[in-house]
Amino acid sequence: MLVVPHAKLFEQVGAAVLIGWNGSREATRAVHDALPLMEMAAAVTVLSVNPEPGDEWGTDDVVQHLARHGLIVRAETFQPEALADADALRSRAVHIGADLIVMGAYGRSRLREMILGGMTQDVLENVTVPVLMAH
């Protein structure tokens, strides 16, 4: 699913791509689905937000996979002290000038979403650049 903010016109999508990576099946599928959009990317950043110490969720593997497709890729780990994960993702997107965010979409029960919130919901409600999500 490609979500495009209605408040802005985007002349290009996919020149600077930020991948929100957590090693999940959904994130893997999103990366696969985004490959055609990333073919002309000048830069792709694979971002792991708040991974456990020593566990970057296979970030090196996805970086190597994308590099084999001819993409210029770099990995980042971001551990914000006071930001929610969705805010951290948006912050890095602005910082690198991303014009596309790629991430997995995760579903939770309505009760759990109300109590804990959810990154997917937060990103969708506050989208500032096009977001490609896969579930």
Image: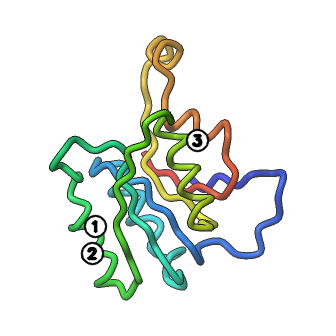
- The local secondary structure at tag 3 comes to helix
| Depth check, front residue: 28 or 16 | 16
CA gap, disc 1 to disc 2? 5 Å
Residue shown at 15% from the left, 49% from the top: 54
Q: Position of residue 72 (x, y in %)?
A: 41, 83
Which residue was labeled with disc 2? 65
Q: Residues within 10 Å of mark 3 (few under 14, many from 20)?
A: some
- Tag 1: residue type? Val
Q: Is residue 120 toward the left or the right of residue 124 in the image?
A: left
- The local secondary structure at tag 2 comes to helix
Extreme-left residue of the structure = 54
Q: Position of residue 102 (x, y in %)?
A: 49, 58
* Mark 3 / mark 1, whichever is N-terminal: 1
CA gap, disc 2 to disc 3? 26 Å
- The local secondary structure at tag 1 comes to helix
Which residue was labeled with disc 1? 62
Residue shown at 48% from the left, 33% from the top: 82
Q: Is residue 10 toward the left or the right of residue 95 in the image?
A: right
- Tag 2: residue type? His
- Tag 3: residue type? Val
Position of 66 relative to 76 (above/below): below
How many marks overall? 3
Name the mark on residue 123: 3
Q: Is residue 116 toward the left or the right of residue 55 in the image?
A: right
Position of 55 relative to 44 (above/below): above
Residue shown at 62% from the left, 58% from the top: 94
Residue shown at 44% from the left, 31% from the top: 107
* Mark 2 / mark 3, whichever is N-terminal: 2
Residue contact at pointers 1 and 2, CB within 8 angstroms: yes
Position of 18 relative to 71 (above/below): above
